[in-house]
Every structure is written in C-alpha cells, then in structure tokens.
Image (cartoon, coloured by chain):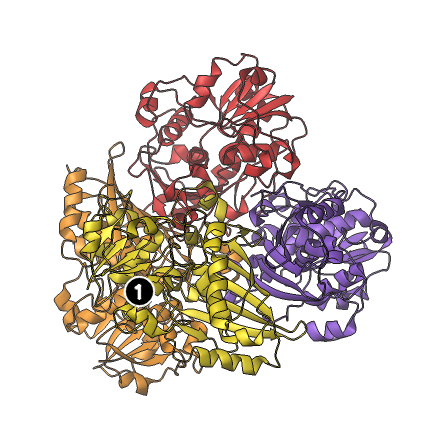
Chain colours: A purple, B yellow, C orange, D red
C-alpha cells in the first residue's frame, strides 16, 4: 500500500509520520507540506529520526493520485478544495473538518463558507466496521468529539440526552502549530483558561450529529473547552441526568459490554482515574464513571491523547479498517508517559 | 495588632506570611509550625527573604493567647482541638474546615469524626460585612467553595438551583505539601486527572450551605474536581439551566451590579476570559459569563488563586473586616503572572 | 515624580507597570506601546487590574518630555532612535541594549548596525551608587548579565578570569512576547534546548565589560544559554579555576562581605540552594557557592527573576538611586512562589 | 528468551516494561516489585495497558533463576545483595550503580558501604561490542554518565582532559518515584535548582572511569547537576579547552566518524540544536557542537531521555548485544514528543 500524508508539517502530521514509520503495511512514500515543502522533515519534527535527510514535498495531485491511500491533515476548507482533483480510487482519511457534518446549516454556523458535503464519520467504536471497510472516503472525527462521544455513547438510553454537560480541557497541540501570542509558552504555562466560550466550539455539531444518529433521537450538549498547560492530552468531564433506574453497577456494566471488543477503549477499574499522561502517544481511551446520587447524575471522566485517538491514531485505525487490516495494526497499545 | 500564624509551614501558611509581611497594621509576631518548629522559615519558604534568620516556633497556647488575632492553617480536625485553650478575646480566622459546616450530618459524611460546631462563614462578598466586623471567630471558606459560590451567587434567582453543574481544576498547592507519590512532579506534569470523583469532594456541602442561605432555598451542585499541571490557581466552570427570561445582557448586568463595590471580584469585559495566571499572587477573582442559547444554559468561567482569594488572601480580607480596617489593606490588587 | 513607561506591552513592560503601580513616589502617568496603542492595558496584561479601563498611549516625544523619568523597554535599536528627541533633563533608564556597550566593535559584532554610544551601566551592586545618583541616563543590564556578573564579581581576584565558564537557563519570558513557533507552549514544555550556541549570545560582551572594569583586567567568559520550560527565572551556573589559596570558608566570607549591605543579593546558608521559584516576582538574587576540590574550581549557582532583578526590578532600583530614594523603594523584598 | 524485570515499580522499571512489551525476542515472564508485589501493574504504570490485569510478583530468586536474562532496576546496594543467589548462567543487566565502579575508594566516597565489585560497563558506543556479547553481567551506565561520556568521547585527544566542565539538567523522573517534599509538583514546577552541588554527584567517578579508560589517561570533570521542571530528559552542556589545532569542521568530522555506525547517536546538522523533547521515549542521543573561538573552547550540547538511553533503552541495547540480537531490536528509533 502506497500511502501519503498531506499537511505533514503540523503536530497531527508529525504524529501520523511517527505512527506510519512503524506500520508494517502502509508504505509511506509521499510526505507533503505546503509552506514547508523543501525543508528537512527533522527540522520541524526533530523526534522523527527515521526520516533523517528526507524533505517535505510539494502538495501535488499527481503525487497524491499515485498513492493508494492518503491522510489529509490540513486546516479546514483546504481538503475540500483539494478533493476534486483526486482520483476516486484513492482512499482518503481526512483529519480536517470539511466532510464531517451532514447538516449544511451547522457547517455554515460553525465554520462558515460553502459546505463541501459529508463522508462517513470515522468513529470506529460507534460505526459499523463494515461501513468503514467499504468506504473510500472517511472523515476522521475531531479530538474533543472523539473523547466526548465515546464518553456518553454507552448510556444514551439512561440519560436526559437533551442536556448533556461537558467541560473538557486540552493540551496546547490541539490548537495547532501557528505562531500566536496566546499560545506562547509564557502565556500557557501556569494557566488554565477557557476559549470558544458559551457553546460556540465547532466540535459541538459533530458530537450532536454522531450521538443523535446513535441514539436515534436528538442529543444536545453544552460544551466548554479549556486550554491546559501541557502539550498533549484531553480530559473530558461529561455529566447528565439519569432518567432510568440505573445504578453504578448497571451503568458500569453497560460500559464494559459496550467496549468489550474494543482494542482501545476501556472502563478503568473502580479505584483508578483516567490520566492524560497515561494515554500519551497511544490510541487508548481511558474512561471512569461515577453516579452522584445526591443530584442523580452520571459523571464520566475520559482521557485521550488529542494527537493519538483524537487525530493521527484514529486516522490509522480507520485506514486499517478501510484496508481490511487488523484495526490496531501499527498502533502502539502502550502509552509513553 | 499582634497577630500569629499557626500552621505556617504549609503552602497556605507561607502565603499568609508573605502577605502579612507587607501588611501595615498586622504585626506578625508569632509564627508556629508543629513538626517544623525550630527550623528556619526560609528553608521551607525560600521566597520569604523578609523572614531570614527567623525560625518557626512551637504551637503553644500561651503564645496564641498573647496575640490579638491568629490565623490557623492546620489540617482539618486540628483547629477544633486547639480552640478550647484559646482565650475568647483572641480573634481567629480558621483556614481549615472545622467550623465551616453548620449541619452535623454533612460534617460526618464528608469529614467524619466529631462535629466541632460552626462559625460565621467568611465569604465577604456574600456575607454582611457588619456581621464579620462583630465576629471574633470566622471560618474561612475553602478554595473551590470560594470560586464556585462567587461564580453563581449573582444569578441564583435566574437558574435551576437544584442542578448546578461544576467542573473545577486546581493547581497542585491545593493538595497541600505532604509527600505523596501522586503529587510528585513526575506524576502531575503533562497530566490532568480527576479526583474525589462522583460528588464526594468535601467542599460540596459548604458551597450548598452558603448558596442555600443566600438563595433562601435548597441549592444543589454536581462538583467534579480536577488536578492540573501547575502549582497555583483554580479555574471553575459552572453551568445551570436558565429558568427566567434573562438574556446575556441582563445577566451580565446582574454580575456587574452584584460586584459593583467589590474590590476583588469583577466580571471581565466581553472579549476577555479569566486566566489563572492573571490572578496569581492576588486576591482577585475574574469572572466571565456566556449564555449557550442552544441548551438554554448560563456558563460561568471563574479564576482565582487557590492560595490567594482561595485561602490566605481571603483570610486577611476577613481579618481586615474583623478589625475595622479597609477590606483590602495589605492585599495586593495586582497579580504577578 | 512623573514617570513614563515606553514599550509597556511586552513582558518587561508589564512587570514595570506592576511594580510601579505600588511605588510610593513614582507617579506613573504615561504608558506607551507602539503597535498596541489604543488597546486596553488589561487585555495584554490581564493581571494588572489596577490599570482596568486604561489604554496604552502612542509613543510620543511630547509626552515623554513631560515626564521627569522614563523607562524604555523597547527592542534593541529602538531607544537609540528615540533618544535624540528627548529633552536632556528627562531621566532615562533604558532596559534595552543600545547604550550598554562602550566598545564599538562589540556592538557591531553582537548587534550590528550603528553604535549609539554608551551610558552608565546600571548594575548597582558593582557600580558606585553616587555615580548612579548623578546620572540622568542609565543603561539597565541584561538579565543574564546581571545574574552572571553578580555571581562571580566577589571572587575575581581568586580565579582565572580568562576562563570563566557559564551555563545559564532562562524561562521563556526572556525571549519576549513575539509570536514565534519555537516559543509556543507546545514546543517549550517538556523541553530544554540551547540557543545562541557557541559564545554568540549578545550579553557576553556586557558581562566581560563590567567584570573587566571591575577586575581591572581582561575577563573572558564562555557562556551557553538554555531555554527552560517555565515562564520566568534564570539559574546561572558559573565556574572558574581557583588561582589562590582560598578555601570554601574564605570564599564564602568574600561573598558575605561583598553583599553585606545589599538589600537584594545574598549568599544562602550552606544547606540551601538557589531556586528560581524562590525569587519569582522579586528583585532578589540568591547565590550559593561550592569548591570542587578534585578539579580546584569554584562553582556558583545563582537564581534571579529575569523580569525582576533581570529587568524591571533593577530598572526601578536604578531609578530610585537616580532620584535619591531608598534603593528598595517599592520593590517587593518577598517573592511569590 | 525468558526475561525478568526486578524492581519494576519505579520509573525505570515502567520504561523497561513498556519497551519489553514490544520486543520481538524477549519474552517477559517475570515482573517483580518489592513493596508493590501483589498490586496491579497498571495501578502504578497506568500507561501500560498491555499488562492489564497482571500483578507485580514478589522478588524471588527461584523465579529469577528460571529466567535467561534479568534486568535489575533497584536502588543502589540492593542488586549486590541479590546477586549471590542468582545462578551464574542467568544473564544480568544491572541498571543500578552497584557494579559500575572498579575503584573501591570511589565507591566508598560516593556511595558508602561495601564495594561489591565491578562488571563490564555497558556503554555500547564506547565499549567493544564483542566484549558485551560475551559478558553475562553488565553494569548499565547512569543517565548523566551516558549523556556526558558520549558528549566528549570523540574529541578526548583534542581537549584538556584534566578540566572538562559539565552542567547538566535532568527531568524529575531521574530522581525516582519516592515521595519527597522537594520532588512535589508544587516544588519543581517553575523551578530550576542545583543539587549535589560542588562535585559530589555519584555519577562523577563513573564518567571519569570510562573516559579515562577510553582516553588512556586521567580525565577529570567538574559536574553540576540541575533539576528541571519536566518529567523526562537530560540536557548536558559540556565544555573543555581545545589543545590542538582543531577547528569546527575538523571536530564535527570527528563526531561524524565516531558515531558513523551508531544506530542511536548522531551529530545534528549545523542549524539544529538538541532538544530533550525530541528524544522523549526513544533511545536516541542528539549532539551539537560549537567552537567558542574567543575562549578557545569546544562546547557540546547533548540531549537524551534519562529513562531511555539513560536507563531502560540502553539496558535493552546491552541485552540485545549480550544475546547476539541486532543492537536496536525492539528499540523505537523514533521519539514521541
């Protein structure tokens, strides 16, 4: 399998390269980066010693069309532009937002501009693997969306789905690699601060979309994102009113069953809490739940690596499924910490 | 005014010393620390150069009784034991939890052991200053309790008070200075993790107590605390269903009026978010609010310094009021960042 | 005293405002910021609540000339341009490099462009206070230069001054507030990396200049700077061959005597090491020394706050001396930590 | 190959487990941890999901003797005690210090107690691989020792070996996982501080030993260690007087040749500096050199992961060589960052 990475100079691109360099089936032979074409890969990703001496290529549709599969990790709006020039036979996992939303109004409200259409939403734990296997184009979910949707999906039947409250904090790589004053180390260290405050984060509609499809009824979330003083990781706290007679044991058992066959998602033992440091560099998802009886709420705490299961790891998981490889091929089950 | 600090070797104790060293009226002449008695103050608090050469004293009731006012910063249970030996005339601000809760069952549930009684709850923005002025004993609120109660108090009449959802993250000094593996730098850096998960944090009853008194009706909160990779600061995200016809403007105006005369609490301008780094070392509270119309919720983001307004700063604010000094005497209005 | 701050939007500018807001004699009535003129001060310095509602002014020589004293915190080259339009009577403390070097060739080698001249080098511990008192223009030393010169000055007669080796690490605010990818939080956290490597850091000549003047013989240093994952603080490790019969006691005693009257610099007790966290927000300098007998070297470890004694604090110390105020007026002796 | 890890509960033990879980030849079937025997591995190493459900075993010589190879990661003094009960046929890589030093006086000075003897010092880049291949017992170098020895070894003939100056900073995992107040996150964040100050760090003699053997003449170093606010990584700055006519080009060429066949150590291109974040989780060593002509010194900057090449990675590299496997088998060439 000839594979390519388009937009390889960002943090997500770097993580794709890292994971693909150890993948036994994907033969990475095209690595493109718009503005950084011609530069040494290791100048931007100094950890990627396996790529020493190699340079970023120009983004070029001829090269893309010579690949069997490409990962696109571009800012939103960019992959939509590119897509018309790519042969239908080329499998694509798009890590951007362009093809995630099926609702045109949602796109216009949260992103603006022309809606490019929608592809299969590649959250493998919530989507039939056979659908992914036959798809040639997959929209890879957003990092927050992944953490939040996986947190609550197993118990949608037990909660008030019209009022799910989420507060989730992300490390700074989630904000990308652009040179902005508010992302300087001097600004982010010692600091917690909210942003896109008041329900305006663009992952909101994709979370509601996938959960509504899954629940077969409208799901609504209140989502407050926070920037945390660490490079990687998302910790999502999700809470909702319990509407059934469920108790902690019955709810725990729903999670256990739901993720029974999952290679990456697990409900932790009762005495262990999810930690972002424990999923660093992995495709793992750690979940813990509690029932706060005095307010009758389920509370869920979930940790992922925003660049792993939140982006590059999940993209490779999708690509594996699209190619009939084992879901976890080339994906380190073990975090670095 | 002769003042003393009991329990001066912890982080809260250190911050009390720092603030008191610059206070024009409080003459700090007794600095006690149980296990660290006899050690140089600067060995434990190397930043406190004003105390160079001085040592921690033994905790001794004769010395305490020679003071006009003492701050007690001991683990819970300790100040209750001490109190019987202190003369009634000595003013006390207790930074521990022993006298915060009026409900015996709450005490037993969240702390265990014998309930020592309750004192005036010294959250000056929610309590009549005249009450504080005549009190000789004040229970200084918990750090989370301060951030959360101040976040929502102005709009209790506009929300569903039976279902306030709070997720709040604290820097590591909030967990104290005891040598525990889970508080090691190697563990906390790069890490966000929840603790006291599922509504069991001991600040829950004091928040509900003060807000219920204030609202004149039962207030209930779902509170999830998080440990964040930074030494100081709390960022609280508080959200509740709006039950009135309020909109963002009318709610903003309630905060503005509520904190109009406050020297420390302020609603930020619309385009500015609270940052824990912006309140570092100060007694300030930064609040921002939004209305998420698609779920009809008010969302509040609030930043404090857990050692400042969350502990030592507020204790001095209370002491100032108890002594008829200006509320902000000796309290730096300006953070360090 | 009417004072102004030119270049108030950067980190050094912000620290000047913070310190000046609590200064009893300097009446801060002109706050200028080139590109940020017209913006709210608290938007850039959210910690400076004392300046709420106030905006940055344009940089304007009429306004400057209405001040008795101005602090200039501009990138190098900028104050030299400004200076010709400022009345001779206006006292100036220049926190930039423009007037630090007396040697034209040094200027050309390390900075490039036209050498603007040189002013009194305001390192008060190494310069006669009377000279500062009569100066109207003072060049405030660089942050590294301050830490390094104070580290070794007391023992210049005891060491091989032709071969002083320095490795010093700085927090990220030392690199300023410009939006550069290499200063992003995602890049600097978890990272130590050297820069300006191989003796090319521009503080090298000013350190050699002040120490050579002080030693009355040529001093040479090998200086390697490092960027550290924290916002503030410099830890300098300075080592040199001992050339006399000195031992640890005699060398300690030289430091003690040298800094006997200093309000800010101190040799720590033998069992305590300098910590950058212990000088945070203060004008303090912590020094510890050792003698490594097996290589016959003195080793000195010194901590300062790069924005405090390394910039804004020292500038105010100089300004105090220029105005015959007590050296430490308005300078917090106590760090925040 | 049946392999065991003794002392698996510490940070080094955890990294051994992580790396061994992906090793194609070493079959990890004995995982022992003294005090933590009986606990779930994932409770202490939550990132090691591959070990879910598995518990630490007791340290037991019968079990050890059933292994073909064991890694011992115990505090110093502990492996010496254990060794007499281990069969001679069991290959051992000892990650502790017990068998690193050949000189009894050095042992007594830096560690105290009885000297247990010395084994082959397993720094594969400086030791004949054939010697390692026939060794059954190898002493794995210390983390600082690895970084420092590799920094200067290629140019020992070009420098004054009697006066090598080293300042090196380490992340906090280097200090182990014991609960000490000075290692709390609240203490280490925002902080740089030296320790074991004045030439007393216990890695000093092993660095001098290996370099002296290598140079065939006495090598002396002045070494100042620093604790840095990050969990992992060492950045070593090494400098020495140049005694030959070498220039930057000739010195660069020595490093290039010296590490030509090395799979892990590389001299970076001229415009790139070593970063601890770039070697995170890998066995890589990044080196950059400069010549500071104005003091005639070579300056070397070197980054390693203290738990990777500085401990667990190098131990596996040694084990590979002892078993005639490719040197880099199971060692990720690529860092995480």
Q: Is residue A170 left or right of residue C212?
A: right
Residue drawn at 60 percent across, 59 percent down: A295
Q: Position of residue D225 (x, y in %)?
A: 36, 40
* Vertical comparison of A3 with C90: above or below: above
Q: Nearer the viewer, residue C22 or B232?
A: B232
Would you call the spot at circle 1 few (<14 residues within 10 Å), some (14-19), or many (20 or more)? many
Q: Nearer the viewer, residue D284 or A93?
A: A93
Q: Position of residue D179 (x, y in %)?
A: 42, 39
Q: Position of residue B236 (x, y in %)?
A: 51, 63
Q: Chain of mark 1?
A: B
Give the mark count.
1
Q: Is residue D58 left or right of residue B130?
A: right
Residue drawn at 48 percent across, 78 percent down: B255
Residue drawn at 31 percent across, 64 percent down: B316
Q: Nearer the viewer, residue A275 or D139?
A: A275
- Residue A244 showing in the rendered view: yes
* Vertical comparison of D254 with A141: above or below: above
Q: Position of residue C243 (x, y in %)?
A: 19, 39
- Residue C7 showing in the rendered view: no
In the image as oriented, which residue stretches furthest toward the bottom? C62
On the image, numbered disc 1 is attached to which residue?
B316
Helix, strand or loop under label 1: helix
Residue drawn at 52 percent across, 45 percent down: D268
Q: Is residue B195 left or right of residue D52?
A: left
Quadrant holding the N terminus of chain D: top right
* Vertical comparison of C280 with B212: above or below: above
């Amino acid at each position: 399998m000839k594979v390519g990475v388009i937009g390889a100079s960002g943090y997500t691109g770097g993580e794709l390269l890292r994971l693909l360099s150890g993948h036994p089936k994907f033969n990475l032979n095209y690595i493109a980066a718009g503005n950084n074409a011609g530069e040494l890969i290791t100048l931007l990703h100094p950890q990627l010693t396996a790529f020493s001496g190699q340079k970023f290529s120009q983004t070029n549709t001829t090269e893309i069309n010579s690949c069997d599969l490409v990962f696109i990790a571009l800012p939103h709006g960019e992959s939509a532009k590119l897509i018309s020039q790519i042969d239908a036979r080329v499998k694509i996992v798009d890590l951007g937002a362009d093809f995630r939303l099926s609702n045109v109004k949602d796109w216009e409200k949260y992103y603006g501009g022309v809606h490019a259409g929608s592809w299969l939403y590649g959250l493998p734990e919530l989507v039939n693997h056979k659908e992914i296997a036959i798809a040639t184009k997959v929209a890879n979910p957003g990092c927050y969306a992944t953490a939040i949707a996986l947190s609550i999906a197993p118990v949608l039947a037990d909660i008030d789905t019209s009022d799910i409250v989420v507060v989730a904090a992300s490390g700074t790589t989630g904000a990308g690699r652009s040179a902005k004053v508010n992302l300087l180390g001097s600004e982010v260290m010692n600091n917690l601060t909210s942003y896109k405050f008041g329900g305006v984060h663009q992952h909101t509609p994709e979370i509601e979309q996938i959960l509504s499809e899954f629940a077969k009824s409208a799901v609504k979330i209140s989502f407050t994102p926070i920037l945390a003083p660490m490079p990687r990781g998302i910790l999502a706290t999700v809470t909702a009113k319990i509407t059934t007679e469920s108790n902690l044991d019955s709810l725990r058992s729903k999670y256990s069953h739901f993720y029974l066959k999952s290679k990456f998602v697990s409900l932790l033992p009762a005495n262990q809490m999810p930690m972002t440091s424990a999923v660093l560099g992995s495709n793992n998802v750690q979940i813990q739940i509690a029932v706060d009886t005095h307010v009758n709420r389920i509370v869920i705490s979930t940790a992922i690596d925003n660049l792993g299961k939140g982006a590059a790891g999940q993209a490779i998981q999708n690509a594996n499924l699209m190619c009939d490889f084992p879901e976890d091929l080339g994906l380190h089950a073990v975090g670095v910490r």
